[in-house]
Image (spheres, grey):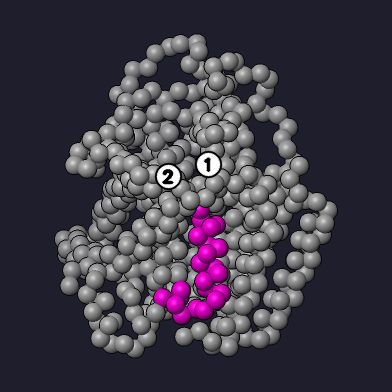
Amino acid sequence: MWSFQQAAQQIHEWLSERMSAGWALALEMVLAGLMAIGLFAMLGLILVLMERKVSARMQVRLGPNRVGPKGMLQTAADTLKLLLKEGLTPDGADKWLFHAAPIMAIVVSMLLLAPIAFAMDFQLWDVNIGVLYVSAMSSLMVISILMAGWASNSKYSLLGAMRSGAQIVSYELSAGLSVLTVVTLTGSLQISEIIRSQADGWWIFKGHVPVWIAFVIFIIAITAETNRAPFDLAEAESELTAGFHTEYSGIKFALFFLAEYINVFVLCGIGATLFLGGPMPFHIGSWEGLNRIMDWIPSSVWFFGKTFLLIFVIMWFRWTFPRLRIDQLLNLEWKYLLPLGMVNVLLAALIAIKGWHF
Amino acid sequence: MGAASLIMLMLAGFTFAGMAIFISSLLNKGSVNRQKGEPYECGIPTKGKTWIQFNVGYYLFALIFLIFDVELIFLFPWAVAAKQTGWLALWEMVIFLLILFLGFLYAHKKGALKWM
């Protein structure tokens, strides 16, 4: 059956036959880079449209439906409009930081793509510390936000950036702790290893209570880390106009927007990989028949299906929960989620040592 | 593809952002207007400097975060080997977390987690 992995293999062989190893690698790099940029643009278009359609349905509206068939081209039109707009720089802004911040945001979310398994055995870099890499890289997001907020010379931006800084670093701990529960059960930080360990069932089914708790904490933490409602204090539009990107206009604003959506995608993809098996089809233990049938669905469909399910859940949050206040937000993390996460990791280790998981 | 993919992705990121900004700068002319450069403040000029001393609460949270982030880094290698190292390491981890939790309780008691 056709798969991403085979396609990559064929391209590799085709190139290796025709040129030296160095050139083949260089050409593959260029190809992969172009694909990453393409994926970036596609995801941006799809996710923004999805966000608008989902919020419209939640509010019993139709959402964008004029541009293109069923409003599919709405985001493309918006991007074009933002391209044509002038990018303003406020007086007295720290010019260098101000212009560097959106680029930094994009580069960080681009780097986050490296260890994601889009299909079975289809990764850019199957690094042996994949999970650690993602948590390290995702914590760089806060730097671009702080840069933007600080450099803008606007009080709204500064407030938004500060809030976002406190919030992101706090929830990073919870995200890390919930990731650790799966790591204790798997005994590996490598993404491909974690996926393979779920061949007889996803961790959310195999791992009992600690994994369920970790999953809930993880979803809350990534919602906060990507500054999405109900934790969107960094850009709380009713209090701070637009938070850290108040002063950004035109394409620089679009870049921030895009980076935010890509971060949501990547973190949801990691959540799907750790708890829901990522590209691993739905398997139950040794039920050969069912497993065989499930294998017919390509692994990339599984991965994107699960990821978009999680993204939908996060979009659902936005229209379900009211926004928290900054002290409530930090209380939730430090007084509830963090102690719970710590106990949860120990519980998961107990289960892993005792072998109580399936 | 290995670690070289990181350089590739970084270049792709720079290219993407750079191209977007470059194309945008080609497409719009822009006009000069004194009001355009003012920081946003509902139509009136902003008062005072922006870069002033800030609420210490944010920094306190950042400091406590630092402690727990280092703790998290120590947890990672243990978590990978949790199955092999077994009970002894688990008990050690319990003690380690307990000590850190005492520090956390101290910070809580001192009011570092209270929002001012």
Q: Residues within 10 Å of mark 2 (few under 14, many from 20)?
A: many
Q: Residue drawn 52% across and 50% down?
A: A321
* Viewer-proximal residue among B76 and A10: B76
From mark 1 to mark 2, how far is it between C-alphas? 10 Å
To which residue does mark 1 refer? Answer: A144
- Chain to which mark 1 belongs: A
Give the residues drawn in magenta, as a range.
Answer: A202-223
Task: Describe the element under mark 1 as helix, strand or loop.
Answer: helix
Residue A331, horizontal then vertical, whole percent: 68, 53
Q: Residue drawn 64% across and 56% down?
A: A333
Q: Residue drawn 54% across and 87% down?
A: A356
To which residue does mark 2 refer? Answer: A259
Q: From the image, which quarter does the C terminus of chain B lie in?
A: top right
Q: Is residue A222 magenta?
A: yes
Residue A120 picture quarter: bottom left
- Is any atom of residue A85 visible in this view? yes
Task: Describe the element under mark 2 as helix, strand or loop.
Answer: helix
Residue A27 picture quarter: bottom left
